[in-house]
Amino acid sequence: MRCSGQRPVEEIPNVSDVVETLARTAGLADIYSKVMDGTRLTFADGLALYESKELMAVGAMANIVRERKNGNDAYFVRNMHLNPTNVCTVDCKFCGFYRPYRQKEQGWTWDLDRCLSEVRKRMDEPLTEVHIVGGHNPDYPYEFYTDLIRGIRELRPEMHVKAFTAAEYDFFAKRFKKPLDQVFRDFIDAGLGSLPGGGAEVLVERVRQEIYRKKIPAERWLDVVRTAHEFGLRSNATMLYGHIETHEERIEHMCRLRALQDETGGFMCFIPLAFHPENTELDHLPGPTGFDDLMTVAVSRLMLDNFDHIKAYWIMITPRIAQTALNMGADCIDGTVVEEKIVHMAGAKTPVGLTMDELLELIREAGREPIQRDSEYNVLQRFDAVA
Ligand code: SF4
């Protein structure tokens, strides 16, 4: 028996019909056909997605790809962040975290003991990963970095060390006059597990010249990551969006990452990073909207066909937007994170960490099945979709 007003099952359109209608109405029928066929989208397609401003259609298509790749799974990791220093010589205009080297007393430069004490503080928490990034601070000796990785691994051998961006590896090679290969060999020997995805910003020279002129050029970032992948290190890739970059430049960035992934297969996850203007030299800019956050997750899911995972980084886009993104292309929401500093120093209003229960609830309420993962997306524990 059915309630009055309820449609018979045979009259309810299936999901792909609904998405096709949405896409057709949005003028995106050709792209829908490609998505259904698994045909790679072109630069022009990526641009058309952004320019359409049809979030429901783009998000629904991204959800098809997301479910094709990851089913109903939504990943998280139990991790902590460690930022040994915020003193930096690179002076990126978008950065609210750093203090210039000439004012280094206003920042922090933790020694090895201080860094390791951060890990010791969390010894009774079941964390599986430490994520380490920091400023380009010339006051550290080379051994600081390898001792830090080694020290963490000695304290917690089970903990995966995901450390330093491609921009930092380039800094280490130049600062200590060592070939990049040697740096990776030494760091792997110390216990390095993988690389986070930062430092890429937008892989376009115009943007670099405008707001992070002293940071490594796109080609060098790609070279450093290529080298890391050749050493068997896997990494993520990010894109800082919502400042001065155009839609074309975002798509160019994604196409460059996609090309490198074709070559190495070393990327695990793409993470769109929302720009936060407060406390930066670009504080006159508004920063991205929630609409843009979701659109960027969805477009990246559709463009990056050779990336297994897309992350909605709740720290930057808020837990609520990240939760919504789980149905618009994202399959990962990062992790519990302990004491995030970088985004919060740029004015983020999100919490500095979420408890496990909060994360589970956030995922379940989105209708997804929570999966605790390790740093390389191996499943550690599956949780029921319903508590
Ligand atoms: S983004 Fe990184 S490299 Fe740029 S100023 Fe901030 S800490 Fe330094």
Image (tube, grey):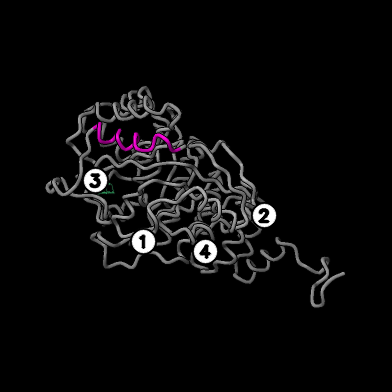
Tell me the kind of residue under disc 3.
Asn
Find disc 2 in the rendering and name its residue.
36
Q: Which mark is residue 48?
A: 4
Tell me the kind of residue under disc 2.
Met
Tell me the kind of residue under disc 1.
Lys
Q: Main secondary structure of the magenta part?
A: helix
Of circles 3 and 1, the one toward us is 1
How far from the left and from the top, in percent, is residue 161?
40, 33
Of circles 4 and 3, the one toward us is 3
8 lies left or right of 165: right
- Along the polypeptide, which appears first: circle 3 or circle 2? 2
In three-dimensional space, the C-alpha distance between marks 3 and 1, rounded to whole angstroms, equals 20 Å
Find disc 3 in the rendering and name its residue.
86
**What element does badge 2 sit on?**
helix
How far from the left and from the top, in percent, is residue 261?
49, 40
Label 2 neighbour load within 10 Å: few <14, some 14-19, many 20+: few
What residue lies at 29% left-to-right and 52% top-to-bottom? 208
Q: Residue furthest front?
A: 124
The quadrant of the picture occupied by the N terminus is bottom right
- Along the polypeptide, which appears first: circle 4 or circle 3? 4
The one of 235 and 179 positioned closer to us in this rendering: 235
In three-dimensional space, the C-alpha distance between marks 2 and 1, rounded to whole angstroms, equals 38 Å
13 over 383 or under it: above or below: below
Some atom of ligand 1 lies within 8 Å of the CB belonging to the residue at label 3: yes
Q: Quadrant of residue 17?
A: bottom right
Of circles 2 and 4, the one toward us is 2
In three-dimensional space, the C-alpha distance between marks 3 and 2, rounded to whole angstroms, equals 46 Å
How far from the left and from the top, in percent, is residue 130?
39, 37
Question: CB atoms at circles 4 and 3 under 8 Å apart?
Answer: no
